[in-house]
Image: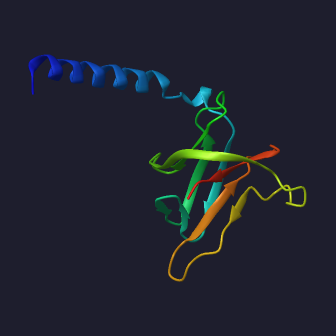
């Protein structure tokens, strides 16, 4: 590789890293959040959440492209961060229901299809 090309790649990577660090939200900048506990494993796109307590939150509340971040409450480990589709909350869905589950395949964790943040009329549909 030519020295100029290598230098440009390193510079581009450094700029991208600084931009990501600047865009990483602080706790105060995050949007709606819910604390949810699961008694059995559940699935999100590309990951299985073991039974336990998690925080679901909107990582970019000022954007029309919703990124949901799911972290384990006891460790703070991020299990999922991904784009979702905004969907209306069904009018017949009980107010205390904030998660919709899909049909599991045999031997596979139940998939979470939508998270409806408490008190909001829009939900976040996970893209599988």
The quadrant of the image that shows the C terminus is bottom right
Q: 3 or 76, which is in the foreground?
A: 3
Q: Position of residue 127 (x, y in %)?
A: 58, 54
Left-right relation of 120 to 57 = right
Q: In the current view of this chain or complex, which residue is farthest to the left? A: 2
Residue occupying image coordinates x 62% and y 36%: 65
Q: Position of residue 86 (x, y in %)?
A: 71, 45
In the image, residue 47 sits, relative to residue 30, either above or below, namely below
Q: 105 or 79, which is in the foreground?
A: 105
Please, which colouring scheme is shown? rainbow
- Quarter of the image holding residue 111? bottom right
The quadrant of the image that shows the N terminus is top left
Q: In the current view of this chain or complex, which residue is farthest to the right? A: 92
In the image, residue 94 sits, relative to residue 32, either above or below, namely below
Q: Position of residue 25 (x, y in %)?
A: 53, 28
Residue occupying image coordinates x 36% and y 24%: 16
Q: 109 or 14, which is in the foreground?
A: 14
Q: Position of residue 36 (x, y in %)?
A: 65, 55
Residue occupying image coordinates x 9% and y 19%: 3
Q: 120 or 104, which is in the foreground?
A: 104
In the image, residue 117 sits, relative to residue 39, either above or below, namely above
């Amino acid at each position: 590789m030519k020295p100029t090309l290598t230098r440009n790649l390193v510079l581009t990577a450094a700029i991208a890293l600084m931009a990501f660090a600047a865009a990483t939200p602080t706790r105060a900048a995050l949007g709606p959040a819910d604390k949810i506990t699961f008694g059995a494993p559940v699935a999100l796109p590309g990951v299985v959440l073991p039974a336990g307590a998690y925080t679901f939150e909107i990582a970019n509340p000022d954007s029309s492209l919703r990124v949901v971040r799911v972290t384990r409450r006891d460790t703070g480990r991020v299990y999922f961060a991904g784009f979702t589709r905004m969907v209306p909350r069904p009018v017949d869905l009980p107010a205390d229901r904030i998660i919709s589950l899909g049909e599991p395949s045999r031997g596979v964790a139940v998939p979470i299809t939508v998270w409806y943040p408490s008190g909001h009329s829009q939900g976040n549909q996970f893209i599988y």
